[in-house]
Amino acid sequence: MTEAIGISIRIDPGIKAAMDVHEEVNWSAVIRQAIQEKIEELEFAPIDREKTAKALALTSKFRAMKRVTKKTAVEIIREWREKRR
């Protein structure tokens, strides 16, 4: 097992007072569990097919648009830098 890393959090004094009433609870374990559950929720969240389809449609639309310029990003940046001098 790897060595654990400590973190600090700030909480409202009212929450801390409520925690102090329940000394029997391992609050560090509660927080670790909540963090782990949130990570799992984020990593294994179901794919929203509707949002994915909209994003794909927008991407296709942008790809189909004609380019305003044939210059590369580097050329445009250099041009703007020269204008500032």
Image (cartoon, helix red, strand yellow):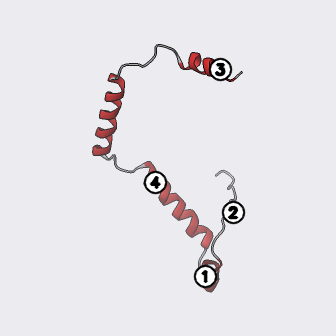
**Helix, strand or loop at mark 4:** helix
Task: Give the residue at x 68% y 24%.
Answer: 84
Residue at 29% from the left image edge and 34% from the top image edge: 57
**Quarter of the image holding residue 6?**
bottom right
Q: Which residue is mark 1?
A: 24
Q: Residue furthest bottom?
A: 21
For the residues labelled 1 and 3, the Cα–Cα distance comes to 67 Å
Q: Residues within 10 Å of mark 3 (few under 14, many from 20)?
A: few
Query: Can you tell which mark lies on residue 85?
Result: none
Q: Quadrant of residue 52?
A: top left
Crowding at mark 2 (Cα within 10 Å: few <14, some 14-19, many 20+):
few
Sequence-wise, which precedes: disc 2 or disc 3?
Answer: 2
Mark 1 or mark 3, whichever is nearer to me = 3
Residue 40: which numbered mark, if any? 4
Return the x and y of residue 50 as percentages of the image width and height: 27, 45
Earlier in the chain: of badge 2 and badge 1, it is: 2
